[in-house]
Image (cartoon, rainbow, N blue to C red):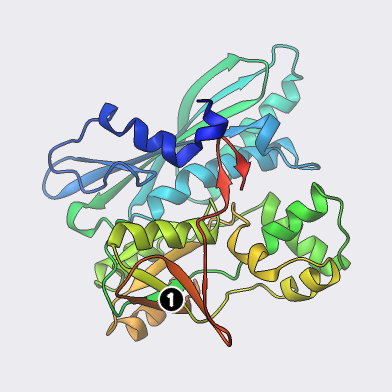
Amino acid sequence: MKLGEMGERAFLSSIRDFVSEIEGSVLGFDEDASDFPLDKGTSLVVNVDTFVGSTDWLPGMTEAQVGRKTAVMALSDIVAKGAKAKATMLSLSVPAESEVKKAEELIRGFSQFCLKSDVPFIGGDVGTTPDTVLTAIALGIAESERIVTRGGANEGDTIAVTSPFGLTSIAFKILIDGLGAEESLRMEAIKAAYKPRIDFGLVAALSKQVAVSSAMDSSDGLGITLNTMASQCQLAFVIDHVPAAEGVDEFAKKNRLNPLDLVMRGGEEFALVLTIPEKKLDDALRIAEKEQAILIPIGTVVKGEGVSLKSSEGLIDISAEGYDSFREWR
């Protein structure tokens, strides 16, 4: 069987037994980040992520924006665990015939985002390869008991997100498929795709007040994220509010697309998906405001399995479809 036929998640399951478990660690195999207990109740939280030019470089994206996005990719998963980002490293491989200035811009974009985010970029490695490949490592520190996993949701928890969804889907439709959009929506969508943002301190602040039970970044798509979290806590997620960004419905209608697909299957938005304990929602909203972040309640955790959307026609299944490293968009 070829990797493209198997898919990323099935492949990950097949290699699970090759990965060691460290005594005292909190994060399991399928968390996109790992933790290593240090001392006095403190853990090192680490993530590695890769940007590949031939599959990830959007049309019109500058080298500096590629570097910036690579930093976001690596840092997003550790802040979703409630860790405070402490440092990053970068391995850059480019074709030998690449222009020096362009290679420098890749690193500058990475370094500049880290600098503005108060996360030191401390070095890495360079090499040559037929494609442009940036592999970033992010390191953070967290209190071991405050690390937030994907599978900690409980029945009655509120499901919330930190941003509306759908703008990156629109950007892909514009940049890759050549669809048109009003200029203001076009600009917002392309900005979301070229320069994604992350909330650095929100999960840590919520965890400190026991106001979050699980969290995950949405880089593979909201649908996959919700299904992953529901599966890991062995409960069902029922969505009663679709967090569509302004303009998504109109764009979908104009182009004869399903707006729910734009919201659920976009990916690369890097917003957080969280579950908030039933009696902690007001506290969580206050904390988010203090952290200059937003929380949008979108549903509830209930008994059962899977993810569904409440509609006038009853419950609609939300499938685990989005980005797959071996299949791209499915």
Residue 8 as seen in the image, left or right of residue 202: right
Q: Is residue 232 visible?
A: yes
How far across and down, in percent of the image, does residue 187 sit? 80, 61
When asked about the image quadrant of residue 95, the answer is: top right
Residue 229 as seen in the image, left or right of residue 153: right
How far across and down, in percent of the image, does residue 60 sit? 81, 42
What residue sits 36% from the left and 63% below the top? 230
How far across and down, in percent of the image, does residue 184 sit? 83, 68
What residue sits 27% from the left and 63% below the top? 152
Viewer-closest of 93 and 16: 16
Indicate whether 78 appears above or below 227.
above
Residue 22 as seen in the image, left or right of residue 298: left
Indicate whether 323 appears above or below 149.
above
According to the image, label 1 marks what residue?
238
When asked about the image quadrant of residue 153, the answer is: bottom left
What residue sits 54% from the left and 55% below the top? 270
Specify the amino acid type for callout 1: Val
How far across and down, in percent of the image, does residue 250 sit? 79, 75
